[in-house]
Amino acid sequence: MEYVSPEGLRLDGRRPMETRQLRAEIGVVSRADGSAVFEMGNTKVIAAVYGPREVQNRSQQINDKALVLCEYSIANFSTGDRMRKPKGDRLSMEISLVIRQTMEECILTHLMPRSQIDIFVQVLQADGGTRSACINAATLALADAGIPMCDLVTSCSAGYLNSTPLLDLNYVEDSAGGPDVIVGILPNLDKVTLLQMDAELQMDTFENVMQLAIEGCKAVANYLREILLEHTKKLESCRGV
Amino acid sequence: MDEKREDGRAVTQLRPLSCTRNVLNRAHGSASFSQGETRILAAVYGPKAGTKKNENPEKACIEVIWKPKSGQIGKAEKEYEMIVKRTLQNICLLNVHPNTTTSIIIQVVNDDGSLLPCAINAACSALVDAGIPLKYLAVAISCCISENEDCILDPNKLEEQKMKALVYLVFRNSIMSVLDEESTQVGESIENGIVTSVTHGVMTVNNYFQCMEQGRAAIKPLSDFLRKKLQSKVQSDVSVAG
Amino acid sequence: MESKPSNSLSSLIDQQVFPGDVVLDLSKMANQTIKLGSGLRQEGDAISVMKAGKLRFAKPNKYWVESSHKRYVPCAGDTVLGIVVDSKADNFLVDIKSPTIAFLPVLAFEGGTRRNIPKFEVGTLLYARVVKANTGMNPELACMDASGKAAEFGPLKDGYMFESSTGLSRMLLNSPTCPLLETLGKKLAFEIAVGLNGRVWVNATSPSIIILVANSIMKSESLSPVQQKIMVDNLLQRVQ
Amino acid sequence: MEQRLANAWRMTVNEKKFIETALLSDLRIDGRRPFDYRNLTIRFGREDGSSEVQLGQTHVMGFVTSQLVQPYRDRPNEGTLAIYTELSPMADPSFEAGRPAESAVELGRIIDRGLRESRAVDTESLCVVAGKWVWSLRIDLHILDNGGNLVDAANIAALASLLTFRRPECTLGGEDGQEVIIHAPEAREALPLTVHHLPIAITFAFIGDENTVVIDPSHFEEAVMGGRMTATLNANGDICAVQKAGGEGVIQSVIMQCLRIASVKAVDITRKIEDAVKSNNTERALRKIKRHPPSAVVDVIKAGQKGADNLLEENMEKPKQEIEDTIVSQSDDMDIETRSSNQNESKPRIDKNTSFIGGPSSWDPYSKGVNVDELKASLASRVAALPSEKMDTAPPVEPRVTVTDPPLTSTNAAPSSEENTGAGQQTNKEKTLKDAVKPKHKRKKKT
């Protein structure tokens, strides 16, 4: 199948190096300490953060840093085929783990010893790149909750189809069976914290694709920063400063 | 009795045994035991502080976890777990470390019949390796009644499938170093004691006693084997210490 | 009845014994006091074995089974290496590889008062002495000797701690010094602390020495004295 | 609370600090350099598709089973492959029985992704009747001893099991020609799987403030590491999967450096696996030929018969004598090797051999028997063989003191079919010695 037309356009009309339209909203769950909705094209994810609060299961308490927990779920209505998935399957367990470890890296956990931070993410609409969207949403929600972080973590995926590196794959491109590289970076420190890849890829191609994904992450980071700035301004004006 | 079995053994012949202790690094005690192609790996952790719910905290608690070679643990494995647990509870001195739990994990590496006896032998060796206080060692053997009423020792899988009835026997090991006649007598009477006997299928009482006799005859060589295998490590220690 | 206890006795000492073996007959040794060490228990008139190992006898009347394990059964008077796992108002909780966690009273230091309670973070390595070891109770430690002096007890800074077996620890503590340490000590300068609970701590000026010493100790577990010496010589040769 | 404290495995501040400081001068606590892999040993079980992998102190057992099932609707002509990993409570005091923990799931997923997404196993060849019957493969990975870096070890175990697995041949028959007939392996040779390439997982750990990179972390290093990255590559240098699930951030150039190192190691390990499989196949073929000598079972013990005592005594004496031997001669490389060849030459030696490794032998025909003997021995109880030999002869090392050696060696590497007995034994010996001493050269000098 042709995923990139001779004119260099992808199925949804994007250029290979183009991300989908990004949209984010902060403060969508009123009960949560921090929350956000993040959209990449048709992929839509909601994240809510509770904490830092007292550790609920005392046996899990860590004496010198905060305990970060993460629960990932995907809504049954989020995909085309409405399959009822059992809760806690291996895939979502893995994604929960990945999100937790990624977010843990940017949270300054040593500032909040003996406390617990819960991150809940749910995929509302899945159209490829859900993992990245989850991480971006979680970052916004953490920032909204006012949890100290060393940097924003942003994530973006990239693939390689028809010998072209493609940024931010959608569902059709994702399920084409080509390689799929998901990268999560700390944009200010310029460090890669999350890196996942499937399927075969030559090493130099991999480098290019990863580079592309990192560029995507940076673009996302800029957008997130704007959104956060806007949100802060809004808060300021609410307070009448 | 001269009849040979399919694998060429005589009816009272055991398969080649092998036993190695301290095969794992992390476990507090471990042993690998094999009888012919049947091989079991046993690991011991403990004694660990605290007992499980519903266990008597005034005694040590024994926990047995059975790991099948493939797939989930089923009813048969649960039964094995229980038999092994009961047997080990009998050979362990439970009042030395009260309110502790000792976990024994049994991993089936290969099953070619006589699985349970092999597991008990392995578990017992692992307990010795871990230095858990024991009253005595257990030696386990299985014995089955074949179609033609032969009583055969240490059956392999094929024989187990064809058998009419099967009995797993666990005896107390024979103690080599009895002091004088008086204690010899004591030793003997205990030695004959059965720790565990589990039967499958129908057999006549006579057959059962026949199995028992055969099994009993195997105690001596089995416990000599265990002695030989389990001492090696200590021996090397001592050569160091000396 | 006409057996000779003395005879069979001598034959069992320094022999391999196994759980269930009867090593002493008390009815034959009236008017004698004997002391039983680890691995032996009394069952009526018979003293039987509960751990596999070598039966040892020390004059005048001590019997015990010598064996090597990865876990440790506390015994009063032993020096051990413990890891602080938590601190409570009265006690530090210390892991010494025993079935239950050991208590180290916060005052059990030289000149310890309520005022000068030391602070140990979790994971601190301590060289301590077992003071009490009774069944059913948590063992108790102290960081001072019987006369209340700090001696060498207390926290160990830097260096590297590794776990071995109780047998190896005993070997290292044996006097005369085992050939392993002797040979190493002639060529290298290092500090070592050995806990009877099967933990060894090594410190030296450079990490390479620590690694060398630690690895040669770990490897010496099953070597004879001569083998130890040869191994160490070879190691040293290579390094130099 | 207190119970949990008492039972957990923990590290001291000293250890953590030392691992980090030693790494600053490129040293690791087990004597390795940052990019040294631990010693790798691959053994195979008697049954097809079972393997045991030992990577340093890490020990993993893999086992493949197959079953005819209905295919998934969206892939009617492809067989399925499922990987089950469980951190057995045997492996580590902190592992508990029951529901798989997060780390077990991640472990399974990494291996799963490496194997499946890169299409290493030809699943289409597992199809029997499209849409109706396909073979479903199940790989069980039992973690037996956690010495760190479970991913790599489990991945190798999975590959080794897959390579030696054979599924029974089946044909269509019956009245309507739709019935599946499964042939017993005795009737028709079972078929090996088609494996296109071997995706090898190589794990790196990032330790300390400086983010020092080390390959193949031990469990001590895993306890202090800030992050971990697993790269799955095949021998062609293609990247099949990468997993760096959060943790310490690293710069891009370090990632690429790791990948390049990984591709070199992958070639190494691929060769090791292939060698091991090859020698296993030869052994297997031999076993087939020698199937007839009335089964390989022999008694060590004849219960209740006269012979028993003699036999036993003999068995008992031999090792003792041997111990003396070895101690006198300080059990050295030479010594052990000569002994091992002796074992196969003289009758009493063989006898003794039996008692050690459970290989049958005292029935007469060596000419026929020896090979089978060795096969069984090596298969049934390599592990057993190894340490028990060691213990009986009081040689340099306890099994658990295994320390690394940069050049990986697999046990099964060599044995040519002819001198199978000797070779197998010797490889064992060699490995023992390598294991024995951290830098093996030191040891060898002695000879």
Image: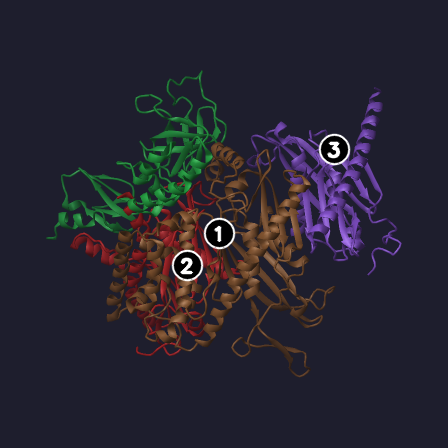
Which residue does the image show at 35% across and 62% down from the upper left? D340
Disc 1 designates what residue? D39
The hue used for chain B is red
**Disc 1, disc 3: CB below 8 Å?**
no
The hue used for chain D is brown
In space, the residues marked 1 and 3 are separated at their CA atoms by: 49 Å
Disc 1: CA contacts within 10 A as few (<14), some (14-19) or many (>=20) = many
Q: In this orientation, does residue B96 appear? A: no
In space, the residues marked 2 and 1 are separated at their CA atoms by: 13 Å
The hue used for chain C is green
Which quadrant holds residue B50? top left
Q: Are marks 2 and 1 on the same chain?
A: yes
Disc 2 designates what residue? D428
Task: Name the disc covering residue A210, or none.
Answer: none
Label 3 amino acid? Gly
Q: Are marks 1 and 3 on the same chain?
A: no
The percent position of residue C87, horizontal first and vertical second, equals 48, 27
Disc 3 designates what residue? A34
| Letter of the chain that mark 3 sits on in the rendering | A
**Counting residues from the N terminus, which is met first, the one under dot 2 or under dot 1?**
1
Q: Name the image colouring.
A: by chain
Judging depth in this view, the residue of B98 and C104 nearest the camera is: C104
Label 1 amino acid? Asn
The hue used for chain A is purple
